[in-house]
Image (spheres, rainbow, N blue to C red):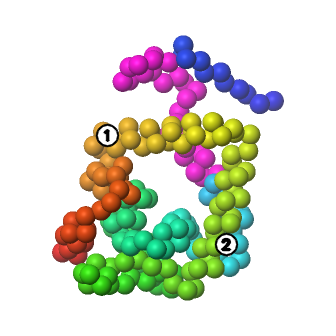
Amino acid sequence: MKKTHNITASSRTEGTAEAPIPEILRPGLEIRTLRNMTNRYLAATLPQEAETATGGNTAILIFLNKHRDDEIFQYDIEKRFGIARSTASRVLGLMEKKGLIERRAVERDARLRRIVLTEKAIPITQALKRSATQMEQVMLRGLSAQDQEKLLACFTQMRENLIATGKLGSYYDDALDFWKPRDTEKDTNEEEGKSE
């Protein structure tokens, strides 16, 4: 028999910055559990052609495929996935060794290295995207369009709350502005600072 919980508005303190959290509402635990489940599902349904992609590679490949026409740099990967520079550098280096990505100089400034998918990675990303789309359809079964919008709004608010604390490190400082138009000169200066 399923155990259900009923959280009502009266179980929370409305309008306060630090509302008490009901014992049954632990978003960190729920999000971590859901992430583990999605990882297991994706591993169990991994298409054969995508076997060279592992762990964090899959999400980065899908991201790069989605933004094939954009200039994506390591800095963008760090921001999008909330990872440290050293982690991004290590993961991208391994992806490069596997022949999944290349780092190419940008015409306007040879100091910048754009991250692009290789021809080998294209069919892999397409297979991964199909698999991820199927998983998301399964996850969203039974949720109305309104529920889905509210869910995304809640995730956005939780991210904003955590970033606003200033305790996540400097690479989150402008994470909320990730896809706003960027200043090319700023990007060049930041890339220079990283290579020092």
Q: Position of residue 69 (x, y in %)?
A: 46, 74
Residue under the image location 26 percent in, 53 percent down: 170
In the depicted structure, whether residue 90 falls above or below residue 20:
below
Q: Is residue 18 magenta?
A: yes
Query: How many C-alpha atoms fall within 10 Å of the one at disc 1: few (<14), some, or many (≥20)?
Result: few
Decide if residue 34 is on the left or right side of residue 99: right
**One can see residue 44 in this view:** yes
Quadrant in which the N terminus is drawn:
top right
- Please report the bounds of the magenta region as a residue range: 12-37
Q: Which residue is mark 2?
A: 127
For label 2, the crowd category at 10 Å Cα-Cα, with few meaning under 14, some 14 to 19 and many 20 or more, is some
Label 2 – label 1 distance at C-alpha: 37 Å
Residue tagged 1: 164
**Does any portion of residue 90 appear in the rendered image?**
no
Sequence order check, earlier mark of 2 and 1 = 2
- Where residue 99 sits: x, y (%)? 51, 85
